[in-house]
Amino acid sequence: MATTQDFKNGLCLEFNGELYSIFEFQHVKPGKGPAFVRTKLKNLKTGKVIPNTFTAGVKIDIARVERRPYQFLYKEEGGYNFMHSETFEQLLINESIINAPQFLKEGQNVEITVHADTETPLQCELPPFVEMLITYTEPGEKGNTATNAMKEATVETGALIRVPLFINEGERIKVDTRTGVYSERVKSA
């Protein structure tokens, strides 16, 4: 058992029979009445963020979660197969808990958050940026670069993203997995 004094961003707790992560919190000491803690909690299963206020000093149940390194193997009908990087155990997870499944490619390293008591996978997070190969895009026209003009491009995983006009087929780019937006062109070594 813990109290509201132990709150910090990212702390996982059991609340109303579900697992939540503290997204944001603020201790408030009004001039009148008892102190309280205003929080925003993110549901680890649905991703929904809810506001909640706790009275200062109230006891809460902390959930034990672990972030484990996994490597993506392949996709099948039932979900996505991953292998633990240290124990080589395989795990099948549903697409709904992966933060950017459209950018997953074979051999990619990810972190899977697991509820330690029940061994249930809760979230699968790709690295913030991934390198992708452009497999198809229309050629850019010279002189169209006065503004931040963008065009559609298909990457090696089949995902469609918008890239600047100067990006051509066969080039490698960095994509932000949190937003799905083009970040930069990767310079060839």
Image (cartoon, helix red, strand yellow):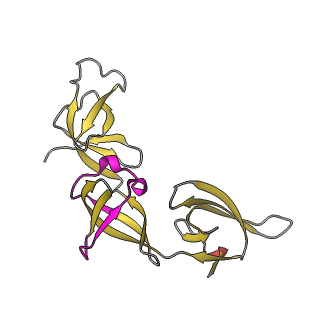
The furthest residue to the top: 143
| Residue 64 shown left or right of residue 135 in the figure | right
| Outermost residue, bottom side | 1
33 up-or-down from 164: above or below: below
User: Could you tell me residue 48's position as x and y percent?
Assistant: 56, 54
What residue is drawn where x is 36% and y is 27%? Answer: 148
Look at 37% across and 65% down and name the residue there. Answer: 112
- First to last magenta residue range: 85-110
Task: Confirm whether the magenta stretch covers residue 103.
Answer: yes
Horizontally, residue 181 falls left or right of residue 117, namely: left
x 33%, y 46%: residue: 102
Q: Is residue 119 magenta?
A: no
Q: Is residue 1 left or right of residue 98?
A: right
Front position in the image: 134 or 158: 158
Q: Position of residue 30 (x, y in %)?
A: 80, 64
Q: Nearer the viewer, residue 61 or 17?
A: 17
Horizontally, residue 65 falls left or right of residue 154, namely right
Quarter assignment of residue 52 = bottom right
